[in-house]
Image (cartoon, rainbow, N blue to C red):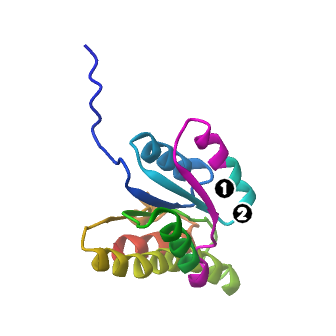
Amino acid sequence: MKSTKKLFDLTDKVAIITGSSKGIGLGIASAFAEYGAHVVISSRSQDSVDIAAKELSQKGYSIMPQACHVADEIQQENLVNKTLDKFGGIDILVNNAGVTLAGKPGEIPLNDWRWIVDINLMGVVYGVETFVPLIQAHKEGGHIINTASMAGHLAAPAMSPYNATKFAVVGYS
């Protein structure tokens, strides 16, 4: 006999998931929604979050699309404020947005370093620093999930910028 009991019940919890218009982030968004959460799908492109939100909304899930470039702390604050306006609270933050950049030391332009550090590391920092005070203020707890990768534990050759940012996310977490 198949059980209908869910392992997790996220009914009426509110989750913001960055980098969730495709790939792993969209998979996380879909799973959270399936378990009852109101999900904010976020990515840099409004078009991409609208497409992802439409796909999940057609399944009857509670989805809010919101463009946000995680490397911009003002956009992160706007993401939180718009989520609060719509749902009244936030219970879960999944810092999933990330980019990759390959290259060997001495061959990578500093602007490329800034780009990957701003998204992969500072995007996580901005999210955490914005979200933690909310958790503390409502005193109901919450969860922060920071996506790194195996590159945060084991460095891959010619991936210095990516390795560095993912090691930093693991250390910060």
Look at the image and give the residue range highlighted in magenta. 52-75
- Residue 104 lies, in percent from the top left, at 61, 74
Magenta segment includes 70: yes
Residue on which disc 2 sits: 45
Residue on which disc 1 sits: 49
Q: Label 2 is placed on what type of residue? A: Ser
Q: Residues within 10 Å of mark 2 (few under 14, many from 20)?
A: some
Res 160 visible:
no
- Residue 81 lies, in percent from the top left, at 52, 75
Relative to 69, is 166 on the left or the right? left
* Spatial separation of the CA atoms under disc 2 and disc 1: 6 Å
Question: Helix or strand or loop: what does disc 2 sit on?
Answer: loop
Residue drawn at (58%, 77%), measured in percent from left and top? 78
Q: Nearer the viewer, residue 100 or 8?
A: 8
Q: In this rendering, is residue 9 above or below 89?
A: above
- Residue 112 lies, in percent from the top left, at 68, 79
Q: In this rendering, is residue 49 above or below 139?
A: above
Relative to 99, is 35 on the left or the right? left
For the residues bearing labels 2 and 1, Cβ distance under 8 angstroms: yes
Q: In this rendering, is residue 165 above or below 7?
A: below
